[in-house]
Amino acid sequence: MSDSEALKVFSRSAVTCEMVDFLAASTASVLRVEKPKAPVSKLGSLLVTPKVVSLKSFIRRLIEYSNVRTPTLMASLVFLNRLRHALPGNAVGSETTLHRIFLAALILSAKSLNDSSPLNKHWTAYTDGLLTNAEVNAAERDLIGLLHWDLTVRESELVAVLEPFLVGIKNDLARRLQSETRSKQECYRLSSRSSRSLASASSKLSLFSASSYSLASVKSSDSLRAPLRDKTSALNRSALAV
């Protein structure tokens, strides 16, 4: 099973929780995030602390709202991987930086792989108020610049970033192929045994027929010779009488 074949199988699969977890972990590995002290606003006698939605929940919402498919969704990993290598090791982001990075990667993936994709104003709506349209546009521009305008999604890069998923697919298909091969071998073995049995039975039947024919021939020959012996005996008796 080649990597290309495994990719085709993977691209036909539905989006799973495992994929979401993998996307969130991959995005979180791009850079370190320092959480500043959350601003506190006073509402009456209550203290209200704004809370940013988790990255995993953010990704789930984007998938649900945009109805993005597996190929487009997982191709965003290519851009995330490139960004990880492009950023300096000491790069640090704010609490929503990872959300912006993932959204920008998904936008580039959708625009690169599809004839039509949501506009940035739609992506802004999908963030449920977390980001403004200006922030979404800025995130996309920044990512394009960091990638040096290289927006091509190469198969070799897809294979590399999706290896954890492709390995399982290739192993499953290899086991299925082995099972099918064993089944074919068993069918061939049973077919060969049946053919040999039929050939043996046919041979025995031929021998039996030949044997029966020989016995019948002997009996027929004996019956023909018996009258001749009777006639000879009669002639001999006549000669003796004379």
Image: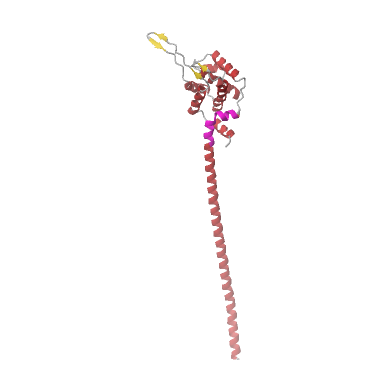
- Residue 10 spot, x, y in % from top left: 54, 31
Judge whether residue 136 is colored magenta.
no
Q: Is residue 114 visible?
A: no
Q: Is residue 108 visible?
A: yes
For this view, does 151 lie left or right of residue 130? right
Looking at the rendered image, the quarter that the N terminus falls into is top right
Q: Residue furthest bottom?
A: 242
In depth, the one of 91 and 123 nearer the eye is 91
In depth, the one of 105 and 62 nearer the eye is 105
In depth, the one of 229 and 15 nearer the eye is 15
Relative to residue 84, is residue 190 depicted above or below?
A: below
Relative to residue 12, is residue 222 depicted above or below?
A: below
Looking at the rendered image, the quarter that the C terminus falls into is bottom right
- Residue 109 spot, x, y in % from top left: 57, 23
**Among the 4 quarters of the image, the one containing residue 149:** top right
Q: Residue furthest front?
A: 90
Relative to residue 238, is residue 200 depicted above or below?
A: above
Relative to residue 58, is residue 237 depicted above or below?
A: below
**Among the 4 quarters of the image, the one containing residue 12:** top right
Residue at 47% across, 21% down: 57
Q: Which residues are magenta?
A: 156-170
Residue at 54% across, 36% down: 170
- Residue 179 spot, x, y in % from top left: 52, 43
Q: Main secondary structure of the magenta part?
A: helix
In depth, the one of 74 and 101 nearer the eye is 101
